[in-house]
Amino acid sequence: MKDPKNLIGGFIAGAALGIAAGMLLAPDSGQRTRKKIVDGSIKLKDDLMNTVDTSLENIRRQFNSRIDQLARAGKQNIDEASEKVKA
């Protein structure tokens, strides 16, 4: 799995560069440019929140899977130790 920090950092940098390039290549009035900045910022925030939510869900899923694996291994070790004590 890719490092989430790099993924999020790259996403933010790419979005910021895209917004800046769009404003520089298609200059508008000050009011219109400010609206574009606000709209772009809102979209960036929403996209970032979706990326963070997805990353957290993946981490949560991996964590729960690992906990299940460790619980099964622990139970198996207890069962094996119990059998040895009985013998």
Image: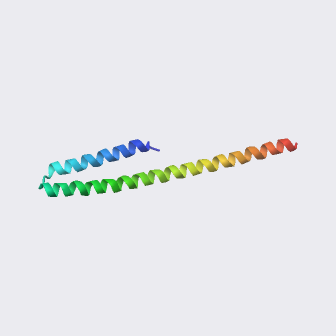
How many callouts does the rendering have? 0
Question: Where's residue 6, x and y in %?
Answer: 39, 41
Residue at 38% from the left image edge and 54% from the top image edge: 49
Q: Give the left or right position of residue 35, taking residue 87 as reference.
A: left
Q: Which residue of the protein is positioned furthest toward the right in this rendering? A: 87
Closer-to-camera residue (38/75): 38
Residue at 27% from the left image edge and 47% from the top image edge: 16
Q: Quadrant of the C terminus?
A: top right
Q: Give the left or right position of residue 79, taking residue 56 as reference.
A: right
Q: Which color scheme did the rendering employ for the protein?
A: rainbow
Q: Give the left or right position of residue 43, taking residue 73 as reference.
A: left
Question: Where's residue 18, x and y in %?
Answer: 25, 49
Question: Where's residue 2, x and y in %?
Answer: 44, 43
Q: Quadrant of residue 43?
A: bottom left
Question: Where's residue 75, x and y in %?
Answer: 72, 48
Residue at 39% from the left image edge and 45% from the top image edge: 7
Residue at 79% from the left image edge and 42% from the top image edge: 81
